[in-house]
Amino acid sequence: MVIDFHTHIFSEKIAAKALGNLSAVCGITPAMDGTAAGLTAYMEQCGVDRAVVLPVMTKASQTQRMNEWFASVASEKLIPFGGIHPENEDYKERIADIKRLGMKGVKMHPEYQNFWIDDEKMYPVYEEILRQDLILLIHSGEDAAYTAPFHCTPQRLQKMVRKMGGGKIVAAHFGAHKMWDEVEEYLVGEDLYFDTSMGTQYYDIEQFVRIVRGHGADKVLFATDSPWSDAKQEMETIRSSGLTAEELEMIFFGNAQRLLGC
C-alpha cells in the first residue's frame, strides 16, 4: 500500500486557471490536471492507494466555503484536510467545523498566508488544532513563488514545536524545502513528522537516508506535493535509496495509517 500524505486539488471550475497561474510563477509543469478526478486517475496510474488532499487559504473569507468543499471530496481514495487563515478571528469555530466535517487535519502555509511560524499570536491557533486532536501540516522552508526571508525555517520551527510540546505536527518538504542542512541541525530528533513531498529531485539521497535514520523512519511520511512532482519517480527513488523493507513500509503507509487512524 502507498499513502501520499501531501497533494493538492482544485474545483473543476478553477483548476485549469489555478494551475496555469501557479505553473507560470513557480516554473514547474504539473503532472496532472489538478482536479479530484484527475488526481484519482493519476494515483491509479502510479500505484498510490490513498492521498491526503490539502487546501491553502489565501484569504480569511475563504475558510468556511473551502473547508466545506474539501470535505465534500472525501472518498475511499481521498482524505481531505481543512485549512485555517491567520486572520480568522473565529478560528475556534472554524477549527470546530473542520472536526465536525470529519476531516483529519489542518494545512497552514506561512508564505502564502504571510505569517511567521513562531509568532506568539499563532500559538493559540496551533493549540486549538492540537487540542481538537487534528494533525497540523505546515509548509516549511523555501517556496518557488517567494524569496527570502522565508517564514518557516528549521530554527523557527524548532522553537514552535518545543513550545507546543511536539505531537501531531508535520513539516512538509522533508522538514524544510532546500534547507536540509538546517533540518539536520535543528529538527532531526524533535517531536514532529517530516513528509517527503517535492523532495527527491532536490535533496541528496545520502542526506535523505541520514535524516530518515537520524530522525526515525517512524516519523517520516511519503508525499509528493502532486500535481507538482512525479509520483512514480518519487517512489522509485525512495525504494532504491537503501532503506530497509521495514523502513519503507513505515514511510509508504504504516506511519500515515497510524497518524490518520485509518
Image (cartoon, helix red, strand yellow):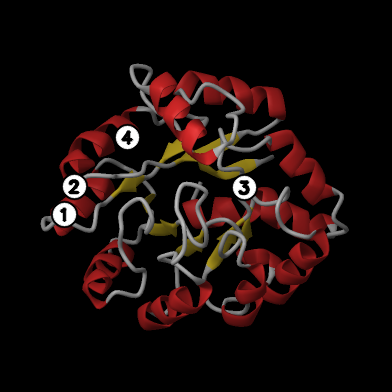
Residue 29 seen in the current view = yes
Foreground residue among 69 and 104: 69
* Residue 88: mark in rendering: 1
Report, in whole angstroms, how far the alpha carbon at label 2 lies from the one at label 4: 18 Å
Looking at the rendered structure, the kind of residue marked 2 is Ala
Residue 52, horizontal then vertical, whole percent? 49, 41
Foreground residue among 96 and 180: 180
Q: How many labels does the image show?
A: 4
Report, in whole angstroms, how far the alpha carbon at label 1 lies from the one at label 4: 19 Å
Looking at the rendered structure, the kind of residue marked 3 is Met
Q: Are marks 1 and 2 in contact (CB under 8 Å)?
A: yes
Foreground residue among 111 and 104: 111
Residue 248, horizontal then vertical, whole percent? 76, 54
* Mark closer to the chain start, 4 or 3: 4
* Residue in the picture at 26% in, 40% down: 101
* Mark closer to the chain start, 3 or 2: 2
Report, in whole angstroms, how far the alpha carbon at label 1 lies from the one at label 2: 5 Å
* Residue in the picture at 49% in, 30% down: 76
The residue at the far left in this view is 90
Secondary structure of the residue carrying tag 3 is loop
The residue labelled by disc 2 is: 60
Left or right of 86, for residue 176: right
Task: Name the front one of labels 4 and 3.
Answer: 3
Q: Do the residues labelled 4 and 3 touch (CB within 8 Å)?
A: no
Foreground residue among 162 and 259: 162
Q: Which quadrant, please, contains the N terminus?
A: top right
Query: Could you classify mark 1 by the number of other residues whose Cα lies within 10 Å: few (under 14), some (14-19), or many (20 or more)?
Result: some
Secondary structure of the residue carrying tag 2 is helix
* Residue in the picture at 43% in, 58% down: 138
